[in-house]
Image (cartoon, helix red, strand yellow):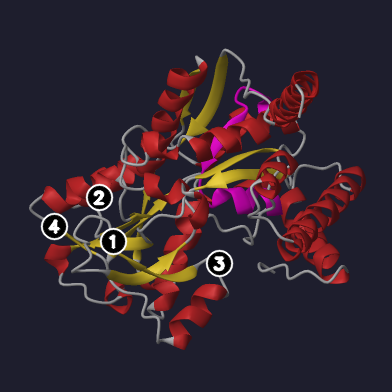
Amino acid sequence: MGFAKTLVWVLLMVGSLGAAWAEVAQTEEPIEFPSTMAWSAYNLGTTGYNQAVAIGKVLKDNYDTNLRVLPGKNDVSRLLPLQRGRVQFSANGVATYFAQEGVFQFAGKQWGPMRLRIVMASNGESNQALGVAADKGIANYSDLRGKRVPYVRGAPALNVTTEAFLACGGLTWADVERVDFPGYSAMWNGIVNDQVDAAYATTVSGPTRKLEASPRGIFWPPAPHDDPECWARMAKIVPFFTRHMATRGAGISKTNPHEGATYPYPILITLAERDADLVHDLAKAIHIHYDEYRTADPGSIGWAMDRQVFRWVVPFHEGAVRYFKSIGVWDDETQTHNDRLIQRQDVLAQAWQAHKASYPEKEGFADAWAKVRVSALDANGFDPIWR
């Protein structure tokens, strides 16, 4: 090959490579965040709050974005800022499902079913459980009969899951002494101070360590995986628990695991109308910077991509789905599942609008909505869960 031909060939190759790199650069668009972002989360010291703060540090270190984390003592105080536009995201719990359904505290006229979407969630090595004070000798949930059990005002996520574990033991609220508290932290202070004998939490939540270190100590009764009656009773109250062996938590380890139940926590959520590019970039940042925050809290390992549960009870945001598709972790069956969940939200939204238009009175509104909700879901082939 002559010099001239060789030069032409080299120039053509350089041009081709340049075009290829330009194409890659266009597909690998840089992540862009606003200078400030706000999330709501659980109280200070909880694993949900700690994980939000850890991700906030990643955003600051890599994108110069300041994340304000607003602690909320109950479900309403975490979701109200999201509804009102004071925060863009919420590191929430299973109240996400209650808000989607428009039940419990979210059945009132100022609420109604919310079009919520998941960005990502933490699925760690912990369980969600009703812990008990070890000094009471409570070995199983049936042993809670006659004991003092907390009820947190304005926190259906805590109360209905507590009810589910009571059901595992064949009990109801009528079988225990109910003690009311204003918030999650107050409830856990209550068990340390011998005001109650049990309290609900994820097993790695900060307040559980306080009980573990106290004179009372901590014990987590099992929800036995080979007890179908326990699980059938729980399923009638909550649809979102899955069997899980926890290896992390207060009094729990790989050599002393806990046989029980779990669901994603915290769940990073936003509204359906949130900008898809922002959600895409946030999902990407949480994924690619995982190693920078995975040791910040015992539950932080749950954000790993291979721990994501894509077929749960609340749909993922289109921006997050776009990112998941781009890295090959989202398939057609998952898309079908997600679409069906969005259809459920559409049915609820239409039923809610019709109910508001036909029922202007505030008195009895929530009770009437409960019947409308069940009727609408039944008519469209969805299980209402709560009738």
Q: Position of 5 compared to 149: left or right?
A: right
Q: Would you name the residue on which mark 4 appears?
A: 217
The answer for how far apart the CA atoms under marks 3 and 4 are is 28 Å
Q: Would you name the residue on which mark 2 appears?
A: 208
Q: Looking at the image, is mark 3 or mark 4 earlier in the sequence?
A: 4
The answer for how far apart the CA atoms under marks 1 and 3 are is 18 Å
Q: Looking at the image, is mark 2 or mark 4 earlier in the sequence?
A: 2
Q: Would you name the residue on which mark 1 appears?
A: 131
Q: Residues within 10 Å of mark 1 (few under 14, many from 20)?
A: many
Expressed as whole percent of the image width and height from the top left, the position of residue 176 reads 35, 68
Residue 189 sits in which quadrant?
top left
Q: Would you name the residue on which mark 3 appears?
A: 238
**Magenta stretch in the rendered image:** 84-102
Secondary structure beneath label 4: loop
Q: Residues within 10 Å of mark 2 (few under 14, many from 20)?
A: many
Q: Looking at the image, is mark 1 or mark 3 earlier in the sequence?
A: 1
Tell me, for residue 174, which label it has, or none. Answer: none
